[in-house]
Amino acid sequence: MTVDIASTGTINLASDLIDYYAFTTTADGKITLSLTGDVTYLTVRLYDADGTTVLGTVSDYSTVIVTVDGLAAGNYYAAVVAYAAYAGNYSITSSLINAEYANDAEVNDTFSEALDIAENGSVTGHIGFRYNGGTYDMNDWYKVVTTQDGKITATFANNTGDYNTIYIYDNDGVTLLGSTADYGTDTLIVTGKAAGTYYIRLNYYSTNYFNGYTITNTVTPTIFANDAEPNDTYASATVTIPENGSVNGHIGHRYNGGSYDTDDWYILNMSQDGQLQLNLTQGAGMYHGIYLYDNDGTTLLANNFEYATVSTIRYNLSAGTYYAKVDNYSATIIQVILYNSLQLQQHMHQMQSQTKIIQKLL
Ligand SMILES: [Ca+2]
Ligand SMILES: [Ca+2]
Ligand SMILES: [Ca+2]
Ligand SMILES: [Ca+2]
């Protein structure tokens, strides 16, 4: 029979005990079998594609309704079964109420089969529906490639109040970065992640939960422009912070694979003798250090660790090359200010000369 089109027949216990009807659904959803007729009492059953696995059965007087939800698109059988000596004519109709939201493209049950989801994009799909044969769509995997360091947010939502679990994995599809579960909707946030490849997984939780859903992902970029990596040693420093100038960068983000950006090195060139002050401005709640090194990249001249704004200063330095290092954790801007103390030294020299003149006069 065809969905939504009535089929008519007769049954009687003596010679026509059971009538089978095959039909096919083309979408996930709730299947209803509706029977009306003049048979006093009878049974209607819904079978899986094997024609033997009973998915639903109802016995009733003259009007019989069988409803089974959570069934994937597939092949099914309806059966009209006579009871005792009750015989007569009937009309039976199969119908389908579609699950909400457009379906996802299966198979996507492992990370290697993941469907693409755009950075800051969304998808719709179905989870937890029973396939012909009795397996369930337990997992839907999505792959997102982020282009900026920052905070990744993944939200699922359904309008049926179903319980789902959402996960974010690293690019190996195995290392779990976070998960959360709830009824209807929930939001998962993972922070401090470098631009890279990540996987989002939605799980059906159990066979009681089947639903359409939306998944949305958002990447909230870390403040300040990024620095050019690698710059993790003084020898690999390529960027010079100009005198009285500044540079921007990120520190402390987790890369795909689990390593972290723990050090950013910069070159400093002092054009004249004086004092050198380094100022570090960083994202809210972040705690990082700023270090000043001599031109060997190992002799520490000054350093400081602090929340918000960090400053460190070294007096009486000769003109030449130095290194600045930002140490660990999240979003930062580094700003260098070079103070010229030459005028102060000249002033002292004048005082010394005047003292000598006074001494001579005495
Ligand atoms: Ca699915
Ligand atoms: Ca799936
Ligand atoms: Ca960096
Ligand atoms: Ca670095």
Image (spheres, helix red, strand yellow):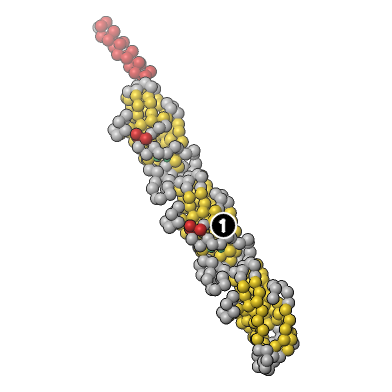
* Screen quadrant of the C terminus: top left
Residue at x-position 29% and y-position 8%: 357
Q: Name the image quarter holding residue 127.
A: bottom right
Query: Which is nearer the eye, 122 or 313?
Result: 122
Residue at x-position 73% and y-position 77%: 6
Classify mark 1 as within 8 Å of ligand 1 or not, answering yes or no.
no
Residue type for callout 1: Ile
Residue 155 x, y percent position in the rendering: 54, 56
> For the view shown, which residue lies furthest in the front direction?
15
* Screen quadrant of the N terminus: bottom right
Query: Which is nearer the eye, 271 or 305?
Result: 271
Q: Is residue 69 above or below residue 195?
A: below
Q: Is residue 114 above or below residue 91?
A: above
Residue 16 x, y percent position in the rendering: 68, 89
**Residue 278 seen in the figure:** no
Residue 320 x, y percent position in the rendering: 34, 24
Residue 266 x, y percent position in the rendering: 39, 33
Total marks shown come to 1
**Residue 13 seen in the figure:** yes
User: In screen coordinates, is 347 left or right of 206?
Assistant: left
Classify 10 Å Cα crowding around label 1: few (below 14), some (14-19), many (20 and above): many
User: In screen coordinates, is 20 left or right of 298?
Assistant: right
Numbered disc 1: secondary structure: strand
Which residue bears the numbered disc 1?
215
